[in-house]
């Protein structure tokens, strides 16, 4: 049920409903997280995430913490770009109506005090997730933090570097523009459906110019791939059984027949062996993505890249 509030406009977003507040007010994006377990065994609670910037840091830290707890289904109320006391008044009104745990990343002392005192008055638990990290840096560096919200999202050299990496990665996806491979930081190779493209774009978002080249039977790899001096080349592989299922599901989603060599396990096994032989011959490190998320695969690739850079700096 939605109670009509004077001055608010009812609007749909992604199939849901939200209220568009007048200028100067805030409204959260509401996420209901399901774990896939039966609802009768779930502990549901309201979780208010209050940020003075985009909220990405707070949401990432919350997600990392929540996976350590079984049988919980928090209803997330995400409040971003919170930079005025008037906005906090709206947030505290919502917290009063739907009390639960409040986590925040607010760097301004006045804003923090308003939120904490308001939560204390409502007898609601309220915690700053960045305080231990900020204290550690402050003690180590011997200086106070600048209390500037959203500073990590400023349009600096790192930001434009990520944009450049994304543009490069889009242009060099799936073997395109092989003549520009040497401009990459990382080149991924592997047979079809080994997560080369999603891993490439994740790495690009982290600021690494990433190209990917498919290894396809009967189709020669570009010669440029074997004479690279700048990027690290990493092979991605997985088990033939898993690869067969992934490819089959891909064909079904495209409404195409699955009666093809593309999903034949023996044929796939030959492809995987061939790809491994090429990587071994060229001394390219290989990562098995069978039980890894894209984030985990990317983390290992970044580790390989960093070690290579460090070794090059020692020469």
Image (tube, rainbow, N blue to C red):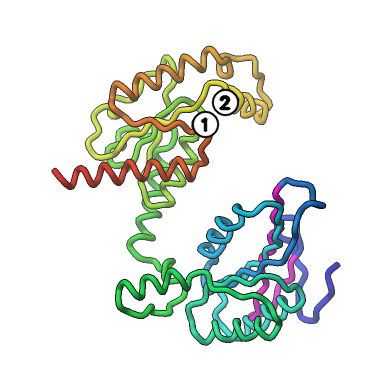
Task: Note whether 114 is above or below 185 in the view shown.
Answer: below
**Picture coordinates of residue 48 (x, y %)?**
65, 69
**Picture coordinates of residue 35 (x, y %)?**
70, 49
* Pointer 2 residue: 242
Task: Note whether 108 is above or below 237 in the view shown.
Answer: below
Is residue 109 in sight in this rendering? yes
- Which residue reaches farthest top? 266
Quick one: SS at disc 1?
A: loop
136 with respect to 44 (left or right): left
264 with respect to 8 (left or right): left
Task: Note whether 216 is above or below 59 in the view shown.
Answer: above
Task: Check if residue 32 falls in the magenta segment.
Answer: yes
* Pointer 1 residue: 290
Q: Residue at x 28, y 25 (%)?
A: 282
- 79 vs 4, nearest the viewer: 79
Residue 272: image tag: none
Q: Residue at x 39, y 66 (%)?
A: 155
Kindly indicate whether the residue at mark 1 contacts the one at mark 2 (C-beta within 8 angstroms). Answer: yes
Task: Note whether 282 is above or below 156 in the view shown.
Answer: above
Q: Residues within 10 Å of mark 2 (few under 14, many from 20)?
A: some
Is residue 175 in sight in this rendering? no
Q: Which span of residues is magenta-colored?
A: 18-35
Task: Check if residue 20 falls in the magenta segment.
Answer: yes
Residue 230: quarter of image: top left
């Amino acid at each position: 049920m939605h109670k009509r509030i004077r001055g608010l406009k009812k609007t749909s977003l992604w199939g849901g409903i939200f209220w568009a507040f007048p200028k100067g007010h805030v409204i959260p994006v509401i996420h209901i997280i399901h774990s896939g377990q039966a609802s009768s065994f779930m502990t549901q609670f309201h979780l208010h995430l209050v940020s003075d910037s985009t909220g990405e840091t707070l949401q990432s830290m919350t997600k990392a913490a929540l996976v350590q707890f079984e049988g919980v289904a928090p209803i997330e109320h995400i409040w971003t770009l919170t930079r005025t006391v008037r906005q906090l008044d709206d947030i505290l009104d919502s917290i009063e109506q739907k009390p639960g745990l409040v986590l925040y990343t607010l760097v301004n002392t006045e804003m923090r005090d308003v939120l904490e005192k308001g939560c204390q008055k409502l007898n609601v638990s309220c915690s700053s997730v960045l305080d231990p990290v900020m204290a550690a840096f402050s003690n180590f560096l011997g200086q106070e933090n600048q209390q500037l919200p959203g500073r990590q999202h400023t349009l600096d050299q790192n930001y434009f570097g990520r944009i450049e990496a994304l543009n490069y990665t889009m242009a060099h996806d799936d073997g395109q523009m092989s003549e520009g491979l040497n401009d990459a930081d990382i080149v991924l190779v592997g047979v079809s459906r080994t997560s080369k493209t999603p891993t490439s774009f994740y790495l690009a978002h982290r600021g690494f110019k990433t190209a990917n080249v498919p290894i396809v039977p009967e189709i020669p790899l570009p010669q440029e791939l074997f004479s690279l001096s700048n990027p690290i080349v990493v092979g991605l592989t997985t088990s033939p059984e898993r690869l067969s299922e992934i490819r089959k599901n891909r064909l079904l989603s495209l409404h195409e027949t699955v009666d093809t060599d593309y999903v034949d396990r023996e044929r796939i096994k030959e492809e995987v062996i061939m790809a491994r032989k090429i990587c071994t011959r060229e001394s390219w490190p290989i990562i098995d993505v069978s039980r890894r998320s894209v984030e985990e695969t990317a983390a290992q690739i970044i580790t390989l890249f960093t070690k290579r850079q460090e070794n090059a700096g020692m020469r």
